[in-house]
Image (cartoon, grey):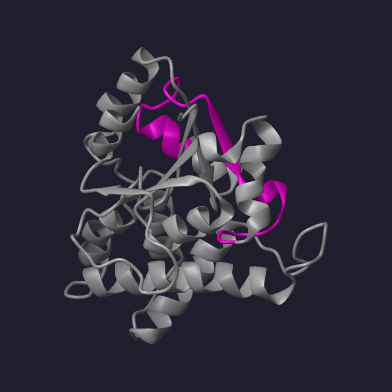
Amino acid sequence: MIRLVVFDAYGTLFDVYSVSALAETLFPGQGQALSVLWREKQIEYSRLISLSDPLNPLGSRHYQSFWDLTRLGLQYACQRLNLELTPAKQKQLMDQYAHLEAFPENGAVLEALKALGMTSAILSNGSPDMLQAAVSSAGMTGLIDKVLSVDEVRQYKTSPQSYGLVADHYKLDIREVLFVSSNSWDALGATWFGFKSFWVNRQGLPFETLGPRPTYSGRSLRDILPLL
């Protein structure tokens, strides 16, 4: 039985590549390349931090917030692509990242979960302020019961400490949790932790060849509803 649905935020509820339109306006011909490299470097930095100090019970001593990693990733991506990132352009892009576009099916799916009496939450690498801004700008306030940030443990996904936040906040058997992510590495980490997992494979990609496949998969958030 599934008693709790936990969503990843970035890439799953919010389209991290929706910044490419603004990036294209600011850097013609480079918008898509910038958005892809920016995302890759943001995630790479989060992994470097968690891998550098994984056993510290107080969290990584090298920890920086996801907002800071997002800004640093943007700066690196622009340097790599030889783009002049002025303070004004950086502010524009970071402001846009704080208000990413939500995927179109979000509202209907979250409302359907409410109608079913299902508890829902977000577990994200995002810092609390980032998540609050994203949820609010997407009109999802009141549709998500709780928003959990890895800031609490200062360890990014896929560390067990990050997924353990769900068990800390909800006294459930972890096998009663459905963890939903469009990031295959995140779905894999959640499966390893012991959650039921759902991979939202919007691009029709092959799953990772490392480790077990997710419990379920589909092309849209709507595909979780028949499971509940």
150 and 210: which one is in front? 210
| Marker count (numbered) | 0
- Residue at coordinates 60% horizontally, 44% vertically from top-left? 149
- Is 97 positioned to the left or the right of 67 in the image? left
- Is 86 positioned to the left or the right of 156 in the image? left
Give the vertical position of 184 relative to 209 (above or below): above
Give the vertical position of 191 relative to 195 (above or below): below
96 and 64: which one is in front? 64
User: Which quadrant does the C terminus fall into?
Assistant: top left
201 and 150: which one is in front? 201
- Please, which residue is most extreme toward the right here? 57
Examine the structure image and report whether residue 139 is included in the region drawn in magenta: yes
- Is 225 positioned to the left or the right of 125 in the image? left
At which x and y percent is residue 95? 42, 50
Give the vertical position of 102 relative to 61 (above or below): above
- Residue at coordinates 50% horizontally, 62% vertically from top-left? 70
15 and 88: which one is in front? 15
At which x and y percent is residue 62? 73, 70
At which x and y percent is residue 12? 35, 48
- Is 36 positioned to the left or the right of 172 in the image? left
- Residue at coordinates 76% horizontally, 59% vertically from top-left? 59
Q: Which residues are magenta?
A: 133-158
Examine the structure image and report whether residue 54 is included in the region drawn in magenta: no
- Residue at coordinates 56% horizontally, 59% vertically from top-left? 157
At which x and y percent is residue 104? 21, 36
